[in-house]
Amino acid sequence: MAVTHLSDQEIQEYFDNKRAALPRVAAHIETCQQCQAQLQGYQELYFALRYEPELSTRLDLADAIMENLKINSEEAFNLPIWLAFFGMIIGLAATLYLVGVEKVVNSLMALQTYFSIDWHVVSTINKYLSGLHLNLGLLAMAVFIIVMMSIIDHFVFQSRHKLISFFK
Amino acid sequence: MTETHELIKRILAGETAAFRSLILAYQRLVSHIVFRMVSNAADREDLCQDVFIKVYQNLGGFQFESKISTWIAKIAYNTCINYLKKKKVPLYDDLTATEESIENKFSGDDSSDAFALSSDINSRLQQEIAKLPVQYRTILTLYHLDEMSYAEISEVLGMPDGTVKNYLFRARKLLKDRLNSKYQVEELWQ
């Protein structure tokens, strides 16, 4: 009588959980040398599959990730500035649309009075400071350069961080 | 409150040391998945980092409906799948073909010197695993290395339990047959 051997799936299921194996399967394994050899083959394979190859045991991700998150949070902090900028444009557009261009222009013209006061104050200050040989135009230019350098440095600082984390 | 709940609560409160602990606890799992799915060595570490950054960004939405390890593994798997799609690596989503056709499709180049020179079973096995479809490789890793259950693997891969079980059986059979066809049993498992 021809012997029906166990299928690969039955052998694997038996190996995965001997206690849940069907009595027929368990009885066959006990007596069949060919299926025992198959089982032995799978046993060796299972053992080898548990072996950890060069899969990354030496990888230390913590420092690089923490650095990355720091940069990301700095970038996220910049977002409201951009949002504020866009919000300002949208707000201006909405005002022009709702109030009307003519009214807005008239209001701006009315502000001229205040501007003339401002210029008066500036010229008064200039008069007092002229005794100190200071040039207000030059001073304004210096302040403008410092502000621009701060903004550039802010972006360069972020790029530098990205470069450092890239080369790490 | 469990240890994991406590850890997540601390991370969400902004405690960076707690997130570092989470990375240390799960970097092995993440790197197993990434290293097994992605062959490009240069991109592997970046992908591992991407996974943890996504974990950090989405941790607030974690509902404790599954184990944190399953949730992180799912993020890692999806990140790698997206990467492979972007790189136009064929994923062979439909693996319901017969064993013979899969065997033919993923047989690779047996005449390579590297294979012939492999001296131990582990290197031979790694080379054979690398030729398997990405889903088979991931299932083998999650089951045998990370000791996940069928249900957990099914959640990570978004496949039914039965499919996971079927793929696992077929992957092991393919590996065993391919190794046995190239080597004498005594030589192979010595």
Image: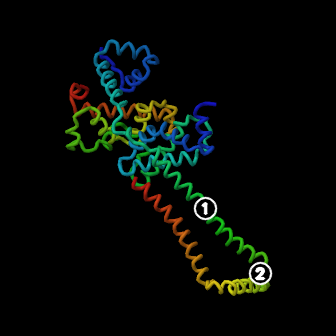
B119 is higher (above) or lower (below) than A150: above
Secondary structure type for disc 2: helix
Q: Which quadrant would the C terminus of chain B be assigned to in this image?
A: top left
Q: Identify the mark nearer the N-term, 1 or 2.
A: 1
Q: Position of residue A148 (x, y in %)?
A: 55, 73
Label 1 CA crowd tier, 10 Å (few <14, some 14–19, many 20+): few
Residue at horizontal 40 percent and vertical 21 percent from the top: A14
Residue in front for this viewpoint, A59 or A113: A113
**Residue, disc 2:** A104
Q: Quadrant of residue A7?
A: top left
Residue in front for this viewpoint, A40 or B105: A40
Side of B151 relative to B122 (left or right): right
**Residue, disc 1:** A79
Q: Chain of mark 2?
A: A
Residue at horizontal 59 percent and vertical 61 percent from the top: A78
Tell me how the rendering is colored.
rainbow
B146 is higher (above) or lower (below) than A65: above
Residue at horizontal 38 percent and vertical 12 percent from the top: A27
Disc 2 residue type (three-letter): Val
Q: Position of residue A149 (x, y in %)?
A: 53, 71
Secondary structure type for disc 1: helix
Q: CA distance from mark 1 to mark 2?
A: 30 Å
Asked if labels 2 and 1 touch by Cβ distance under 8 angstroms, the answer is no
